[in-house]
Image (cartoon, grey):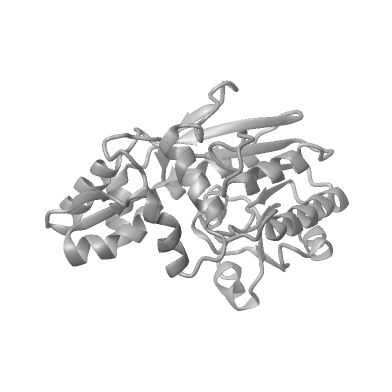
């Protein structure tokens, strides 16, 4: 039995579907009971647990051969990341209680960095689960290709892609959520000892101009990439409703300055197979 958290999202769902396709039993760990029917109809056991509830998570993980930990993302965290810390504490206690055979934790590119930024939430969970008394794999994927979803409306409306990734010709590793889920499912089925890091990127690095060109082809209209000036970010994010925009700005700076990147020192850098044009077509559809 494999217990999958975050199953209603793209990565968790892809992980569960890959395991089901292989004929393996899956326990869907859900926060929202109203979404249980979809997974029950596909043959999953269902467990209801909030990610901050150590007791419910422990019950959901009990008897599992492997557990996939997908911490919920907090894009506007309070100082010190209290939201993430509550989840991390609950997950650590649940794993200790349930003692599954192994765990795969979704982390992020750049989780090894000590410089504060939005992705430090994943650094914190790696640090905590490194102390877990079981084999744990930290899966560190690149920038999600699916982030292009935020650019589609603008590309349709005025033919512009407003990019926070800069400069526009600089390509960085990106990966599709389908590849992340597929690899997570493969890792859950493996045997290993201790803790390990697996980094995952797509078939090729991608730049904002490449994203614009892909959108143009998919939409059948010109799309031009344009940078969002760095000095406007904080005011823009606050107008969009953020109360604590600094971690997000630090994260973007990290990608643009190059210090949020893969370590590439573990011998476990994998490449996905899903291309950007496939992701864009699916998002538009």
Q: In the image shown, does 242 or 195 lie closer to the viewer?
A: 242
Q: In the image shown, does 120 or 87 lie closer to the viewer?
A: 120
Q: Position of residue 242 (x, y in %)?
A: 51, 66
- Residue 55: tell me if it is visible: yes
Q: Residue at x 77, y 43 (%)?
A: 128
Q: In the image shown, does 142 or 29 lie closer to the viewer?
A: 142
Q: Position of residue 95 (x, y in %)?
A: 81, 50
Which quadrant of the figure contains the C terminus?
A: bottom left
- Residue 142: tell me if it is visible: no
Q: Extreme front residue here?
A: 231
Q: Is residue 209 above or below residue 26?
A: above
Q: Position of residue 182 (x, y in %)?
A: 50, 44
- In the picture, measured across the screen, residue 133 lies left or right of residue 126, that is right
Q: Extreme right residue here?
A: 97
Q: Residue at x 67, y 51 (%)?
A: 69
Residue 46 sits in quarter: bottom right
Total labels: the figure holds: 0
Q: Is residue 75 above or below residue 269?
A: below
Residue 140 sits in quarter: top right
Q: Position of residue 149 (x, y in %)?
A: 35, 59
Q: In the image shown, does 231 or 62 lie closer to the viewer?
A: 231
Q: Residue at x 59, y 59 (%)?
A: 74
- In the picture, measured across the screen, residue 269 lies left or right of residue 44, that is left
Q: Residue at x 84, y 63 (%)?
A: 55
Q: Extreme left residue here?
A: 221
Q: Is residue 161 above or below residue 140?
A: below
């Amino acid at each position: 039995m494999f217990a999958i958290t975050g199953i209603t999202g793209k990565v968790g769902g892809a992980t569960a579907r890959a395991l089901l396709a292989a004929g393996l039993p899956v326990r869907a760990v859900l926060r929202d009971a109203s979404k249980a029917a979809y997974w029950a109809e596909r043959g999953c056991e269902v467990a209801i647990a909030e990610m901050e509830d150590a007791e419910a998570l422990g019950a959901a993980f009990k008897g599992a051969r492997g557990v996939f930990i997908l911490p919920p993302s907090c894009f506007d965290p309070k100082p010190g990341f209290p939201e993430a810390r509550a989840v991390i504490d609950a997950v650590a206690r649940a794993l200790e209680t349930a003692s599954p055979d192994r765990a795969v934790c979704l982390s992020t590119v750049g989780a090894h960095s000590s410089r504060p930024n939005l992705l430090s939430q994943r650094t914190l969970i790696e640090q905590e689960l490194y102390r877990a008394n079981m084999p744990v794999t930290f899966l560190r994927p690149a920038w999600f290709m699916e982030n292009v979803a935020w650019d589609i409306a603008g590309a349709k409306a005025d033919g512009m892609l407003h990019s926070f990734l800069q400069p526009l010709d600089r390509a960085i590793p990106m990966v599709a959520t389908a590849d992340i889920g597929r690899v997570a499912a493969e890792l859950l089925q493996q045997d290993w000892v201790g803790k390990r890091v697996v980094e995952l990127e797509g078939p090729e690095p991608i730049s904002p101009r490449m994203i614009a060109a892909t959108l143009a082809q998919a939409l059948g209209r010109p799309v031009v990439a344009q940078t969002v000036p760095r000095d406007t970010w904080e005011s823009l994010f606050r107008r969009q409703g953020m109360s604590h925009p600094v971690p997000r700005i630090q994260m973007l700076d990290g990608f643009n300055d190059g210090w949020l990147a893969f370590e590439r020192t573990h011998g476990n850098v994998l490449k996905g197979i899903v291309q950007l044009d496939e992701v864009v077509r699916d998002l538009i559809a």
